[in-house]
Image (tube, helix red, strand yellow):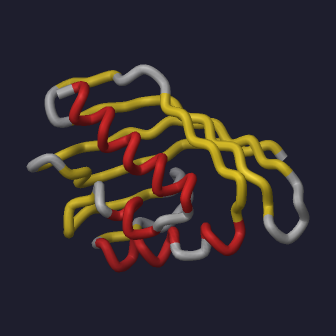
């Protein structure tokens, strides 16, 4: 299972790097729940998840995404991540680091919770 979960995270990360919203959403189940951070509203379903990510290509450039070691327990997995990008409007570099916690079903992510901090 670890390799299947690693591929889900790698696909998600490649989509983020490319600003490819369809690639990002391809890892989610149709009824998936996405929570950007503990204080954000849940995004439920592919349309709402796509809506969250739709502005990434317009706002982020030169993005890199790297995930860490996978921690797996049945249909759940977690990993740390680091994502760096340049803000298109200001040219400022951002370094975001955090963790992703996922529940899967039938080879797709059913729930993703992200906890992260960015600098600056």
User: Image height check: is 78 above or below 107?
Assistant: above
User: Image height check: is 59 above or below 100?
Assistant: below
Point 55% across, 64% down: residue: 19
Query: On the image, which quarter does residue 32 sit in?
Result: bottom left
Query: On the image, which quarter does residue 39 sit in?
Result: bottom right
Q: Nearer the viewer, residue 11 or 30?
A: 11
Q: Nearer the viewer, residue 49 or 60?
A: 60
Point 88% across, 55% down: residue: 92
Q: Nearer the viewer, residue 74 or 60?
A: 60
Residue 15 place in picture, x, y as percent: 46, 56
Residue 70 place in picture, x, y as percent: 36, 24
Left or right of 41: which side holds 64?
right
Query: On the image, which quarter does residue 115 sit in?
Result: top right
Point 78% across, 48% down: residue: 94
Residue 81 place in picture, x, y as percent: 54, 34
Point 44% across, 40% down: residue: 100
Left or right of 61: which side holds 18?
left
Residue 6 place in picture, x, y as percent: 32, 33
Q: How many marks?
A: 0
Left or right of 7: which side holds 63?
right
> From this viewpoint, which residue is outermost toward the left?
106
Name the image quarter holding the N terminus: top left
């Amino acid at each position: 299972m670890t390799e299947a979960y690693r591929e889900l995270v790698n696909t998600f990360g490649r989509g983020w790097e490319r600003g490819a919203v369809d690639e990002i959403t391809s890892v989610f189940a149709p009824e998936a729940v996405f929570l950007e951070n503990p204080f954000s509203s849940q995004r439920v379903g592919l349309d709402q998840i796509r809506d969250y990510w739709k502005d990434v290509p317009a706002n982020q450039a030169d993005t890199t995404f790297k995930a860490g070691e996978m921690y797996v327990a049945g249909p759940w997995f977690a990993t740390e991540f680091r994502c760096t990008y340049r803000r298109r409007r200001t040219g400022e570099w951002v370094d975001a680091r955090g963790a992703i916690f996922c529940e899967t079903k039938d080879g797709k992510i059913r729930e993703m919770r992200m906890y992260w901090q960015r600098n600056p």
